[in-house]
Image (spheres, rainbow, N blue to C red):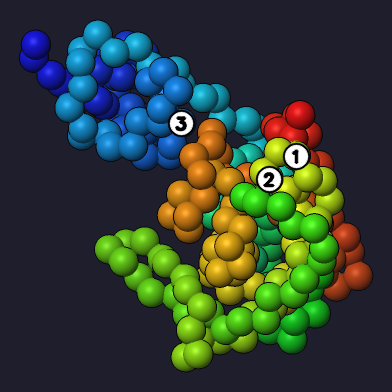
Amino acid sequence: MMKEKAYKVLAAQEGISNSEAKSLIDRGLVYAGNSKVMIARGEISPKTSFIVQKVEKVYPIFEDENMIVVDKPAFVNSDEIERQFKGTQLLHRLDRETSGVLMLVKNEEFRLKAIGEFKKDQVYKEYVAWVDGIVSEPFIIDQPLITEKKGNKAYTKVSKKGKPAITEVTPLEVSAKKTKVQLIIHHGRTHQIRAHMKYALHPIIGDESYGGRPSKRVMLHAKKVTILGKTFEAPEPKVFGHFGS
């Protein structure tokens, strides 16, 4: 039987352009059966029936003259959100499959002030995640991290040559062989939580790049941020609540 490239089959099925179909696959939103379609150019049967996950809308949770704070959905690049809110600039980033509090700034004076707080480690950053294995008591990971570029992807690992990074881990709920944890990070290096949890042998579920088991998404959510006296909170996505049941 003749095979066809996955993105072309998807484009025909959904009535969308080839480039839109490629983008959906690249974002990790397309499934054939229970398996995520990983490679847009992969050869596949033209009769394959796809399921496409919907991306949730971006909701502002706070806005004033200096900044806008949104609850970022999973599967959306931080840069796309910056383009959506004209005249803003990202203050920090969240990985594509991470959801939660994302801050954008509206003027340079406030941006420099806020960056100063990050540099002094004066920003409180709290995440929630589902991780592999049973975490029975709180612990702290104090391990330096180094980030390397592989192709156009960043990959972070523990290394004596790295920069300081601390992650505080507190178990919240245990279900089967997985644990919901609260994570408070200091320094905020690229992929800090992902690399630290891999090092601790409790990789984040869905984070296959860092040894996690497959899931519909990376089970990591930026729940709360406090900066310059203001606290912003993004409620946990519904999937985090019933994931343990």
Question: Mark 3 is on which residue type?
Answer: Leu
Pair 2/3: label in front: 2
In the rendered image, the vertical position of residue 162 relative to residue 195, given as above or below: below
Check whether the beta carbons of the residues at disc 2 and disc 1 lie within 8 A of each other.
yes
Q: Nearer the viewer, residue 25 or 23?
A: 25
> Relative to residue 160, is residue 171 drawn left or right?
right
Q: CA distance from mark 3 to mark 1?
A: 26 Å
Q: CA distance from mark 2 to mark 1?
A: 5 Å
Question: Residue, x 47% and y 71% (percent of image)?
Answer: 156
Quadrant where the N terminus sits is: top left
Question: Mark 2 is on which residue type?
Answer: Lys
Q: CA distance from mark 2 to mark 3?
A: 24 Å
SS for tag 2? strand
Question: Residue, x 8% and y 14% (percent of image)?
Answer: 2
Residue 7 in view (yes/no)? yes
Q: Nearer the viewer, residue 219 or 7?
A: 219
Question: Residue, x 58% and y 46% (percent of image)?
Answer: 205
Q: Which numbered tag is attached to residue 29?
A: 3
Q: Which numbered tag is attached to residue 175?
A: 1
SS for tag 3? loop
Question: Residue 83 at what x, y percent from top left?
Answer: 53, 48
Task: Please identify the residue farthest to the top as the structure is shown.
Answer: 47
Question: Mark 1 is on which residue type?
Answer: Ser
Residue where numbered disc 2 is placed: 178
In the rendered image, the vertical position of residue 190 relative to residue 176, given as above or below: below
